[in-house]
């Protein structure tokens, strides 16, 4: 990994150095493990520097109203510095310009660049802008914040958060040696799958909080921020173990609610749970069977008259993003799309029959094969 834009880093460092306790900083973060661990590092780093985080709030990373919401808040408060972490805030360049009238902005993220929002008021940091030699999606926001803020303050007591962020974002192949160092430093057993390690356990508990509600995920963020060590984090988050138990119970008994389509190497799984676990179930169940296509169906978290479907095919032999996109075409108030190996759809219950008919046709069609 090679820094190709040292001036951007210098600008960031100089900006933080120039802040004082009078500044009112707001941190907005994704509520997934990477977003929460990044926010924890940023919060603690600022505190160590004697700086004040006045607002700490979560967003879903693709929330279309995110920057608009931030704009309203900044207008009615004395916030003058806004930090976006692991959020697609650059999706809304016009709104960013509005926010800039009230505050300086730091945007640290590793999703693809949607718009270059760098300006005199905005420091825009994504791996693809300042480093080469690493796939941007692998330079997770937690590690970005750690590397950037470590230029200003010693964060080595909190580097276990990087282990969580890296593992939760499936970025481990880019950080093998670094992770080995963390396993050693914290005397953590290395398992066959990183997600089964102690770092992974904390990631799973944060994901579990997300399955209850957005508000619960924000509470989980505060619990992580209060934790000085991994053991404290596990203790503070232990209330979410019941969800992990429910997920495990479901995985052990998933046959009962699975429709198999052996000729298509595909399955449809129906979930009934008070927790919103279809996406986790889809991920976990597909990791062991990469060639198989899974559609996991659950009533929508916010509207029981709707269905949310998570699709997975880890081998990418079909393009699930295209399938999901086309499978809901013409449905009223529906959405569908995503990546080749992981995609989602959301539509009214009454459209399920047609949806099922379509996906069964599509998975066999040449045009939905991938590569
Ligand atoms: Mn991330």
Image (cartoon, grey):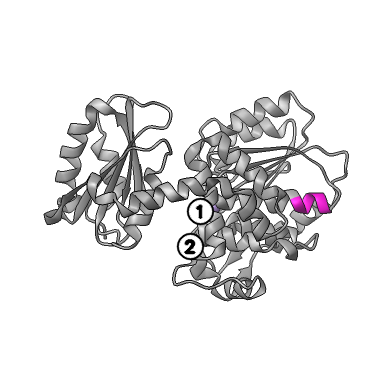
Compared to residue 333, the image places residue 136 above or below, namely: below
Would residue 2 appear left or right of 302 to someone viewing this image? right
* Circle 1 Cα neighbour tier, 10 Å, few/some/many (<14 / 14–19 / ≥20): many
Q: Are marks 1 and 2 in contact (CB under 8 Å)?
A: yes
Label drawn at residue 37:
none
Q: Read off the residue under disc 1.
A: 204
The answer to whether 190 is drawn above or below residue 13 in the figure is below
Q: Mark 1 falls on what kind of element? A: helix
Q: What stretch is highlighted in magenta?
A: 44-48
Query: Looking at this view, is 138 or 126 the one in front?
Result: 138
Depth check: give the residue in front, 11 or 221. 221
Residue at image location 57% in from the left, 58% down from the top:
165
Residue drawn where x is 88% and y is 44% of the image: 20
Please identify the quarter of the rendering in which residue 3 is found. bottom right
Residue designated by label 2: 195
Q: Is the magenta stretch mostly helix, strand or loop?
A: helix
State which tag comes first along the sequence, 1 or 2. Answer: 2
123 to the left or right of 324: right
x then y, percent, for residue 196: 48, 64
Q: Which of 3 and 276 is in front in this view?
A: 276
What is the C-alpha distance between the residues marked 1 and 2? 8 Å
Q: Which residue is drawn at 60% across and 28% down?
A: 68
Relative to 174, residue 313 above or below = above
The quarter of the displayed image where residue 297 is located: top left
Secondary structure at badge 2 equals: helix
């Amino acid at each position: 990994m090679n820094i190709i834009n040292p001036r951007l880093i210098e600008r960031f460092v100089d900006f933080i150095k120039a802040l004082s306790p009078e500044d009112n900083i707001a941190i907005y973060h994704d509520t997934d493990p990477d977003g929460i661990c990044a926010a924890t590092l940023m919060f603690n780093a600022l505190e160590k520097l004697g700086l004040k985080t006045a607002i700490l709030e979560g967003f879903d990373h693709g929330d279309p109203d995110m920057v608009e919401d931030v704009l309203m808040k900044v207008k009615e408060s004395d916030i003058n510095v806004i930090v976006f972490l692991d959020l697609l805030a650059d999706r809304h360049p016009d709104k960013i310009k509005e926010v800039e009238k009230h505050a300086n902005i730091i945007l640290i993220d590793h999703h693809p660049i949607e718009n270059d929002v760098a300006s005199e008021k905005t420091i825009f940091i994504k791996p693809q802008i300042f480093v080469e030699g690493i796939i941007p999606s692998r330079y997770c926001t937690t590690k970005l914040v750690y590397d950037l803020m470590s230029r200003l303050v010693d964060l080595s007591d909190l580097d276990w958060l990087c282990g969580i962020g890296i593992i939760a974002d499936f970025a481990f192949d880019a950080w093998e040696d670094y992770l080995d160092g963390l396993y050693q430093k914290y005397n953590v057993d290395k398992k066959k799958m990183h997600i089964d390690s102690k770092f992974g356990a904390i990631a799973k508990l944060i994901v579990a909080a997300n399955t209850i509600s957005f508000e619960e995920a924000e509470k989980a963020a505060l619990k992580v921020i209060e934790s000085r060590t991994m053991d404290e984090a596990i203790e503070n988050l232990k209330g979410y173990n019941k969800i992990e138990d429910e997920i495990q119970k479901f995985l052990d008994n998933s046959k009962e609610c699975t429709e198999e389509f052996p000729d298509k190497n595909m399955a449809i799984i129906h979930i009934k749970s008070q927790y919103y676990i279809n996406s986790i179930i889809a991920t976990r169940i597909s990791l062991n069977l990469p060639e198989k296509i899974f559609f996991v169906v659950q009533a929508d978290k916010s509207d029981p008259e709707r269905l949310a479907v998570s699709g997975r095919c880890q081998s990418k032999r079909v393009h699930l993003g295209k399938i999901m996109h086309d499978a809901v075409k013409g449905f009223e108030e529906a959405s569908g799309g995503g990546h080749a190996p992981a995609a989602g759809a959301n539509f009214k219950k009454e459209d399920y029959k047609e949806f099922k008919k379509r996906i069964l046709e599509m998975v066999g069609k040449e045009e939905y094969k991938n590569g």
